[in-house]
Image: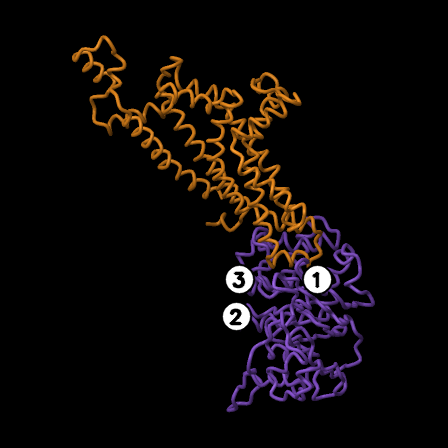
Chain colours: A purple, B orange
Amino acid sequence: MNTEAGALLEIQDLEVVFHLEEGPLKAVDGAMLTVKTERVLGLVGESGCGKSVTAKSILRLVPQPPGEIVAGKAIFQGQDLLKIPRDRLRKEYRGKQISMIFQDPMTSLNPVFSVGDQLAEVFTTHRGMGKKEALEASAEILERVGIPSAHRRIRDYPHQFSGGMRQRVMIAMALACAPKFLIADEPTTALDVTIQAQILELMKELQREMRSAILLITHNLGVVAEMAHEVAVMYAGQIVESCPVEEFFDNPRHPYSIGLLRSFPGMVPKGERILSIPGSIPDMLNPPPGCRFHPRCQEAMPRCRRESPPDRMAGDNHHVRCWLHV
Amino acid sequence: MSRFVLKRAAFLIPTFLGITLVVFMAMQMIPGDPILALLQDNYTEELAQQLRVKLGLDRPVPVQYVMWLKRLVTGDWGTSILSKRPVLEEILHRLPVTLELLVLALTAALVIAVPVGVISAIRPNTFLDYSAMTLTILGISLPEFFLGALLLLVFSLNLQWLPATSFVPISENLWQNLRHMLLPALTLGLPRAALIARLVRNSMLEVTRQDYIDAARAKGLSEFLVINKHALKNALIPTVTVVGLQIGYLIGGAIIVESLFALPGIGSFGIDAILQRDYPMVQAFAIVASSGFLLSNVLVDLVYTVLDPRIRLE
């Protein structure tokens, strides 16, 4: 495994707040992430822990208001994406160098425009192509992602495609400009199990071919094992552990990571009980003091209730945020 | 697509028959014997019987309905009691004025409502949004006769920018015609604009939360394309439904506006016919108004097929 790869994207101390009627909600609280060139980083965590908000922040897609990126950096090839003018972000990065695939292919394609029209927009926007040329390019890329009779199907509308086919269209759209970095927000969660494997296989193949890096958001550890080179675990708006993927499965440090692994059916040896993590994620309007995880942690110490643990190294490339490892 | 149009058009026939039946029944229920009215002082039992046979009034009511319907579709709509001229001729003479008023009013409503709704939705809860939405409440609340009078007072009497109550046909002078039609069209259109603007705002707010809007932004599209292409087309689908229903109110409102601005359309004419009990005219007015509503709803359905591909393939 090559650990020498340079950082393509570094998220530093990201803080995102949603200003709600009930008060400010800190969805992301000091998140740190590094995605390396041509590598896949799996970002795991329960629903509502801030994974999607972190991902959307990179392209500044967090709805504002009510959302607001209050602090932090997202440095992509030396450029802080959170600081550059919006117009530059749109023209040079969104859909060109950085693309995004969304969770639900049933809702992420616009129902009233043909698939070809929606694909062609990427080419007309970023490649300066005319409509006809862009449609031709669209058909080619659809063919590449495995849609049969692509030249005919570019005239069809999203409702004429199955879920798996729509996700292929989304992948085609994301990869149209051969981006250096792809954000995939639970790309297979909404799909049938058999289709999931096909989509993952396609993404893996294209990732190798286009040499893109991927930030893969998922709560499926099987997908992480299959796809990722590195793993980051998010809990209640914070990254609590990050390390290479083998290290994560062999030697997890944070009690939450250990809990996740024990509660995932595919990871538990046959005959052993699957253990769930007691409790549920905290109310983000009133997060617990100290370590966010302490109310659910079986190894919680008095200190955990008072002070938030710092981010520490627990080995080569292994970050963990827990008082047990300070 | 053409199959959809044919199917939709086929549904027009039974609905139209229903309208004629209701109008015919209403006429039957009007108290008083038409023979009595026709013969007046010359009334004798014998003469009355002859006239009944001649006019077909001795036949059973269903037969009378079929005979009446036959005359209706062949263009024989009877003679106006007041003007003594054929009803169809009177109607066709006035219809263009009403159609022009309706088209101008609806155009004004949409031209005002869509941009206001979109701007309010992309800047929600700002001063601009609040001002626009307050104005729309006012617009919805003002009845036509009041709004019309207000516009007349300001733009005709005080400022003297526009003529008050006269009319120039479109064939005579387009510019003068439009100057005369502007205030009536605004009187009729502004309350609709207010309602439609609120609706566009709400649908836009709903649509801009959808994943495909995020996806469109993530592709790098300009905000102009995201809003005016990807969001607006979706937001217009629920709006079109309400616009279709509003056409009914527009036809009703046209009666008041035509009377107020003394426009020679079928609305003001219909009012006169009702007040003077010119029954053949009233009958024709009811059929034309309801058929107009019917046809406008078919048009709305066709607009749907243009906006939403999911309907086309049904």
User: Which disc, if any, is residue A162?
Assistant: 3
Q: Is residue A100 above or below residue B111?
A: below
- Residue that badge 2 annotates: A192
Q: Position of residue B91 (x, y in %)?
A: 44, 21
Q: Is residue B37 above or below residue A283?
A: above
Q: Are marks 1 and 3 in contact (CB under 8 Å)?
A: no
Q: Place residue B148 in its image quadrant.
A: top right
Q: Position of residue A93 (x, y in %)?
A: 75, 60
- Mark 1–mark 3 distance (CA, rounded to whole Å): 36 Å
Discs 2, 1: same chain: yes
Most extreme residue toward the top is: B42
Name the residue rendered at 52%, 20% in the picture.
B262
**Which element type, helix, strand or loop, lies under badge 1?**
strand
Query: Between tags 2 and 1, which lies in front?
Result: 1
Residue count near mark 1 (Cα–Cα under 10 Å), binned few <14, some 14–19, many ≥20: some
- Mark 2–mark 1 distance (CA, rounded to whole Å): 35 Å
**Which element type, helix, strand or loop, lies under badge 2?**
loop
Q: Is residue B133 above or below residue A153?
A: above
